[in-house]
Image (cartoon, rainbow, N blue to C red):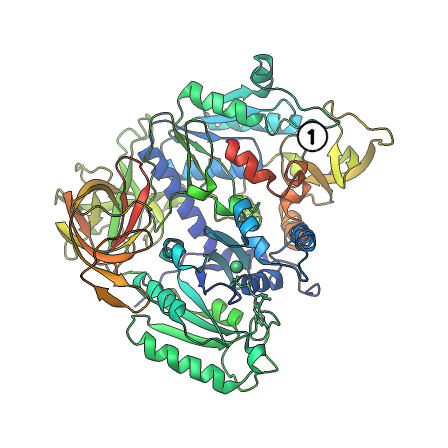
Amino acid sequence: MNTEIEEKIDSQKYLEMDLLRFTTAGSVDDGKSTLIGRLLYDSKAIFEDQMDAIEEVSNRKGKGYVDLSLLTDGLRAEREQGITIDVAYRYFATPKRKFIISDTPGHIQYTRNMVTGASTANLAIILVDARKGVIEQTCRHSFIASLLQIKHVIVCINKMDLVNFKQEVFEKIQQDYKDFASKLSIPDIRFIPISALMGDNVVDRSENMAWYEGSTLLHTLENVNISSDQNFVDARFPVQYVIRPQSDEFHDFRGYAGRVEGGVFKPGDEVVALPSGFSSKIKTIETIDGQLAEAYPPMSVTITLETEIDISRGDMLVKANNQPQNSQDVELMICWLNEKQLVPNGKYVIRHTTKEARCIIKDVRYKMNINTLHRVEDDTTIGLNDIGRILIRTTSPLFYDSYNKNRFTGSVILIDEFTNETVGAGMII
Amino acid sequence: MQSYNLTHLKQLEAEAIFIMREVAAQFEKPVLLFSGGKDSIVMVRLAQKAFAPAKFPFPLMHIDTGHNFVEAIEFRDDMVAKLGANLIVRYVQDSIDKGRAQDEKGPNPSRNGLQTITLLDAIEEFKFDAAFGGGRRDEEKARAKERFFSHRDEFGQWDPKNQRPELWNLFNGRKNPGEHFRVFPLSNWTEMDVWQYIASEKLDIPNLYFTHKREIVVRDGALLAKSDFITLLNDEKYEERIVRFRTVGDMTCTGAVESTADNLDDIIQEVASARQTERGTRADDKRSEAAMEDRKKQGYF
Ligand SMILES: Nc1nc2c(ncn2[C@@H]2O[C@H](COP(=O)(O)OP(=O)(O)O)[C@@H](O)[C@H]2O)c(=O)[nH]1
Ligand SMILES: [Mg+2]
């Protein structure tokens, strides 16, 4: 219980907190729900009525303990089957940071959910059962984290209580993981030995593992530096909506509304509008609270230009000396999200930034075996949860960066023209 | 390299504005569901920000159960007048009169479920293809599974097991004729975020949220306000208490909390130390473990 925790909140500090989005991965029973439950409970994000409700259900189902997974498993079918089917989002805050957790199910048949959760995450926690060590699932989850360009991974070696808190066990797993992860591109990997059940190294330092000198999990989450993860170099402003007030007061106002997806924009900057190629200068950066001296990701602003040029939704403002790639032929890593397989030569609707177009699948280069990380070239059927590399041709040119350079100008979704479902998640190479 | 940091509330604001603009661009006829409660007040503020200096390009709509707090309706009309916005009101009572809906039986018949019928009828009447709601994922476990863009079939139903994945900033609002979307720009906000935002933006809210004297009856642990819509049971009686409301909804199922908070900072301190979720005071969610999921499947907000 944590009733002694300081209850008062300092609003000024609250407003200054930053935001960390993280996703959790691990195979069934590695302790994900227990860990999330503990983080939520210790940060007081679980309320009494929620606790009462899950206690009541746990008792009714004859469980000997309070099943914290009932908190995250929000759908009837999930509770009935005792598994997590869909991504659930959870929130908690400490005086330092606000956190958004996307809790995704671990099974292979839910790769699409992990990809979804990972697409907006700054950090991934990958759970490993200390008794089992690095297993196929660990590799798969890490590969997805790497593919989705999550810059920070915390490998939590859980259930240390079941291996007598032995340092050798931790170090062996750490080494195994490092050997495997050298094939991936994750710049920041940390290892923490924990017991989610007993709380060791989650919020408080473990007395059972005095040999561990690193930070606790919560301390790491609170302090990991994510401010430089966003691209502040390559200025990108996809136009979302054109604002024309048509009132007397703002008769000539013409503003381009959108979200800055890269770089920094300032009044006076020379900009080029794509695809037209016309250039102009930024006159003002407008918000209802006044004009801004600069705009950077992920701000939603309205830009006005010195000269009137024809710009509409789907166009992009960039700087003349730093332009994105521009092509109709685009190579992608694709994760397939739908039961209906990808159709070679099939046509799909494609969404990229604020632009919508159509595309045709020109080629499937290979499929990934996501457990071994081998390329499979003789079987190129891409079905639900498969990841592969494809070439597409779009009906009109896309202005894009590689996903490695910019997550938001480097990602696309494919939509089935008939069912309107989102069927593919693509990362531009 | 210089680093740029946006605080969490600014990030949530930017996200919500992005969503609103996306809806304005992707849909023909959006509407913002407005109840006069704190979440919808925040929504209106965000809509103003998203389209300034123009007016936001959609009307407001209130589904009126007839079981309202007078203060909430007064506040609503006052706010709409100040905004110069277009407000549509559709009444559950009309749906009942037309035989399309029927009141529940019992000592506090809730019209909460009935709103769905009136809402779906209104969506069809005006051919709205997207309806903004102020729902947040932290409110309730079925809501935790909601998408920003939540697809509804031609019957207005939510199919939680078959939702479209949402990745990055890419929102898929494509649909067939007759279908529509519910859109939740505040998905990632918590109750605390909403209060902090109201405080930092200095937004007006109905005085129901602040402490006042009120006659209430205690029923199943909930403090229900005295009204014409509640029938006292045998041993029940009204008593005066010092209370305020954490949510403002249908009078028959919105419980008060005992509180002396008379300003936003006190409310914020109360929220910080609260041991009950805000919906813990709502009788409609207590009906069963999946009450919200079931109502949402039918087309509830
Ligand atoms: N001994 C021990 N058991 C744990 C620990 N963490 C989780 N467990 C248990 O492992 C089982 C599965 O945990 P759960 O959180 O449901 O795993 P999930 O499937 O990854 O969500 C439960 O019985 C937990 O009590 C730990 O650190 N030590
Ligand atoms: Mg679980």
Task: Give above or below for B22 relative to B76.
Answer: below
Q: Residue at x 48, y 71 (%)?
A: A220
User: The C terminus of chain A appears in which quarter of the rendering?
Assistant: bottom left
Q: Height in image: A251 above or below A428?
A: above
For residue B86, say whether it is visible: no
Secondary structure under the numbered disc 1 in the rendered image: loop
Q: Which quadrant does the N terminus of chain A fall into?
A: bottom right
Residue found at x 65% / y 28%: B71
Left or right placement of residue A84 versus residue A122 in this view: right
Q: Which residue is mark 1?
A: B252
Pointer 1: residues within 10 angstroms few (<14), some, or many (20+)? many
Position of residue B215 measured from the top left corner of the image (x, y, whole percent): 79, 32
Q: The numbered mark 1 sits on a residue in which chain?
A: B
Residue under the point 18% across and 47% down = A344
Q: Position of residue B238 (x, y in %)?
A: 82, 31
Residue A200 figure quarter: bottom right
Nearer to me, A378 or B4: A378
Q: Is mark 1 within 8 Å of ligand 2?
A: no
Three-letter code for the amino acid on which mark 1 is drawn: Thr
Q: Residue furthest top?
A: B98
Q: B240 or B125: nearer the eye?
A: B125
Query: Residue B194: x percent and y percent?
Result: 54, 46
- In this view, the residue in front, A267 or B39, is B39
